[in-house]
Image (cartoon, coloured by chain):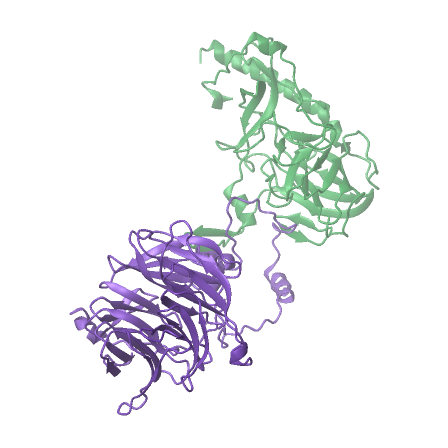
Amino acid sequence: MNLSLLDPFAVAKEYPEVLFSKLEFGHSTLIKSSYNSDYLASGTIDGDIVIIDLDTHGIIKILRNHTRAINSLRWSNCGRYLLSTSRDWKVNLWDLTANEPIRSLRFEGPIWQAEFSPKNQPFEIFISIFEDDCLFVNWEDKDDIRMSPISVEGSEESSNHYILTGVYHPSGNFLFVGTNKGLVNIISTIDGSTLFTEKITSSNVKNIILSQTGYRIAVNFSDRIIRQFKIPDLVNEEPENWVLEVEHKYQDVVNRLQWNSVSFNSNGEYLIASTFGSSHEIYIWETTMGSLVKILEGSKEELVDVDWNFKKCEIYAVGLDSGKIYMWGVIVPQKWSALAPDFVEIEENIEFMEREDEFDIIPENEMAQKNLELEEDIEVDLLTKDTIDARGFSIEKSFVIPLKLEHSQNLFE
Amino acid sequence: MSSKIPRLKPVPYKESDLYQPLLAPQLGPGCGTTEDIPYNKRDFKYKPCRPNPFLLSKMYSTTDLPPYKGRFSYFDRSQRMCINEDCDQCTSEDCWRSVKGSLPIRQGRVYVEFKILNSEGDSHVRLGFGRREASLEAPVGYDAYGYGFRDLTGQKVHLSRPQDFMGSFGTGDTIGLLIQLADRIKIDDIDRDEIPIKYKNQLFFEQYDYVVTKPMDHLLNPVTVFGEKAIPDKDRYKPPVIQGSFIKVFVNGEPKGTAFENLYEFLPPASELKKGARDDGSLGYYPMASCFRGGKVQLNTANKPEFAPQGEKEYLMYNELYDDSKIEEYVWDLIDEVESAWLDELGL
């Protein structure tokens, strides 16, 4: 049912509450929903990438090239390209109109992560490599792939000091990286120079995530604390004046839980994290006050990767043992009366208050005259499309993955 | 009389019933609704009764509840229609609810006077005459069994179709309705078929009430519905009329003309019970008032009109029917007793 016809208070819920579905297509290790929230890419332990249509929850594509478990997946903003890395030491760029990778790189060691730059997608990427300098790669020209390594700066102990993870600032000019010695650096993507460095703690950085608005950054350290920083004004302020201000620290003081994976919601007002070990839950914090608002339960196993689908207001997580994809969402009660505006849904009987002339029968021509007087010329606009959806997200024309139905027979080979 | 063989013998009363006082429904100083009497509904009607040790076969006789006059009825009233202790005022907080008078007007020329106590703003009233079958959950004039007047426009309403008649009227106006029926109706037999029942420890006679007949209903909705199809009627039913009858309207005594002429006949076969068509003495035209959202009406229960209808001399006030009506009831009680005793003697 059309969301805009439903109860606006139910539609406007900020975060999901109910586990409504479980999907199982192979043993999933990693999930990522596309920017337009139409598709979900799931990386499996065998190296397959399964594209799931989120309206039907059916597989529409399986991408096969990797031979080991997928460990990073990124969608391009347009929704057409997918960047994947795997434990087979390969980085692949997929064009979803084809079934083969259009670019592929094999490295000398395992890769942590690959990331699309907001600029010049899908050909400018950032790759972090196990115990090696990370790279900016431009592979626009297939035969002339340019790579520029970035090493850790701003630390005395430069031996065994590597960048583990990174995330682009929405402007595309800056890259936030986290190192294995607890440093958070800001690197210029133009010349690869380190503009800012700060040692937060001495333990590994596990994930860095940035809110879509570009105001907040959350860093998951292996000292069991997620730190949330306010991003300084990178464009107008000089790098010397930049300060990374800790807004909140999220940690479980009692159980000292380790956090597996973190994610923001669309406007950065909520942060979610999956937990390591025997606690099978997802924590949701509200980021302005830093308070825990909800714990999502329902899985019977440890959850590894989490992903927040903004437009559908759903949270997905992958179970460690079974590889199932758990889905939490908002259940909006159906309101069929919205289709007939002169009907009202009532909870209990109400007494009908008739009009003074309710029983009177007025001849048809008089009635028509009366109705004519009441009716005003209302122009109904049938042509202009809505620009925002029921949850306030702008409606953009997004890439639709072409389906070849005759192909689907050998999809499951 | 033959219709009653074998007769249904009433349940004998207990001795304590003889000493049970006749209680009028409890009503406060304002208008209220009553809890302890049955309402006329589901094709049954009620009237109060008393055990009577002089009537050996019939055992019960008809009686009346105070106040003893021509007034609004306790029984012939929508459950949500409120009346006062004197039974001469009525009001409803809901939408259209109606009440009828306690006595039928069966013959002659009778003047009924309504005073409008409130029809301000959202509140409205409609006044008129209705027969036994007229719906109490609708304004008077809704069906073929009533003739009404609308305060908002002064229109006359019959079969739900308002027609322009006079100017609007409202709070403070006294509307006099003069109804002329047949001068004298022929009464062959009154067959009352009444059963004494106990309701909340009080005795009442229960009788079949008159039911809306199909042809009369088709006057209001001239269509026949077959599933999803509605087929309009080809021939319009012409109910029998009382020749020379009319309803004249007076506003504060000032004549406004004749609103309705040749009113529909009420004597059988024009009125039907669930089984058969016979007269039980309750047929006739009743004064009827309908109130909408706080509309309030007062019925004149005196023997003198507040505003004498100009140009009219020969008429009875509604209250003047009271004594005759009660005497008639008593006579029919005696006739019923004789008849029942004879049937008992035959062993039927």
Q: Nearer the viewer, residue B171 or A179?
A: A179
Q: Which residue is drawn at the image coordinates 55% and 31% (left, top)?
A: B209
| Number of numbered discs visible in the structure rendering | 0
- Please identify the quadrant where the C terminus of chain A is shown: bottom left
Q: Residue A73's spot in the image, x, y percent?
A: 31, 72
| Residue A57 higher or lower than A90, as above or below | above
Q: Is residue A339 visible?
A: no
Q: Nearer the viewer, residue B261 or B113?
A: B113
Q: Nearer the viewer, residue A171 or A370?
A: A171
Q: Quadrant of residue B279?
A: top right
Q: Is residue A8 left or right of residue A397?
A: right
Question: In the displayed image of the protein, which residue is found farthest to the left?
Answer: A413
Q: Residue B191's spot in the image, x, y percent?
A: 55, 24
Q: Nearer the viewer, residue B269 or A20?
A: A20
Q: Residue B181's spot in the image, x, y percent?
A: 69, 37
| Residue B127 higher or lower than B208, as above or below | below
Q: Is residue B176 left or right of residue A395?
A: right
Q: Residue B194's spot in the image, x, y percent?
A: 54, 22
Which chain is painted in purple? A
Q: Quadrant of residue A26?
A: bottom left
Q: Is residue B324 left or right of residue A67?
A: right
Question: In the displayed image of the protein, which residue is found farthest to the front?
Answer: A156
- Please identify the quadrant where the N terminus of chain A is shown: bottom left
Which chain is painted in green? B
Q: Quadrant of residue B250?
A: top right
Q: Is residue B181 visible?
A: yes
| Residue B305 higher or lower than B16, as above or below | below
Q: Which residue is drawn at the image coordinates 57% and 14% (left, top)?
A: B337
Q: Is residue B322 left or right of residue B305?
A: left
